[in-house]
Image (cartoon, rainbow, N blue to C red):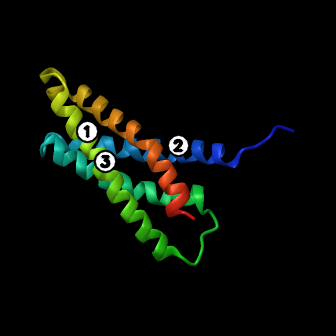
Amino acid sequence: MPVRFRITEEMYESAAVGTISTFAGIGLSSILDGVMGTDASNLVGLVFESVIDYYGQKLVFAPKGSGRGAFRAARFLAGKAAAIAVTQGIFVACMRAAPPKYRTDPVGIQVIRLGASVLAWVPHFFLRKYWIFV
């Protein structure tokens, strides 16, 4: 019988939830790019992604729930605010550093968004695992 590592399973499950919520947020941001600036549409997408992410991560880390729902939600909001700030900061910095052709190309913008999300994922996992859903 193979040895099972719960943290590894949680990382995979959390990454799957995060991937789905991230692509939902990136999709919304992409749609909104034509309506508002890329910085604003990225922020709206991150907030939308956060709602999906909360419920999905809750299924990964606390599937049976607990009586501390409001406390967990408050911690999630605090952690997510920090996560959004970090991800948005990475996105804005990368957009400013990118060559002009990538800043106006829809695919280039999405690649930068996805890269910012990937860079910010690792600290977010440990924040969820050891502070939010404990």
Q: Earlier in the sequence, mark 3 or mark 1?
A: 3
Q: Which amino acid does label 3 sit on?
A: Val
Instruction: Tell me, for residue 16, which label it has, or none.
Output: 2
Left or right side of 19 for 106: left
Viewer-side label of 3, 1: 3
Left or right side of 79 for 17: right
Q: State the residue position of label 1.
A: 91
Residue 43 position, x and y percent, is: 24, 50
Viewer-side label of 2, 3: 3
Residue 106 position, x and y percent, is: 21, 29
Q: Which amino acid does label 1 sit on?
A: Phe
Q: What residue type is labelled 2?
A: Ala
Q: In which quarter of the image is residue 116?
A: top left
Q: Which of 126 and 45 is in front in this view?
A: 126
Asked whether residue 106 is in view, the answer is yes
Q: Distance between the residues labelled 2 and 3?
A: 20 Å
Q: Earlier in the sequence, mark 1 or mark 2?
A: 2
Residue 72 position, x and y percent, is: 48, 70
Q: Earlier in the sequence, mark 2 or mark 3?
A: 2
Quadrant showing the C terminus:
bottom right
Viewer-side label of 1, 2: 1
Q: State the residue position of label 3.
A: 86
Mark 1, secondary structure of its residue: helix
Check the image and report above or below for 51 versus 45: below
Q: How far apart are marks 3 and 1 (CA)?
A: 9 Å
Check the image and report above or below for 77 versus 14: below
Q: Residue at x 39, y 59 (%)?
A: 79
Q: How far apart are marks 1 and 2 (CA)?
A: 21 Å
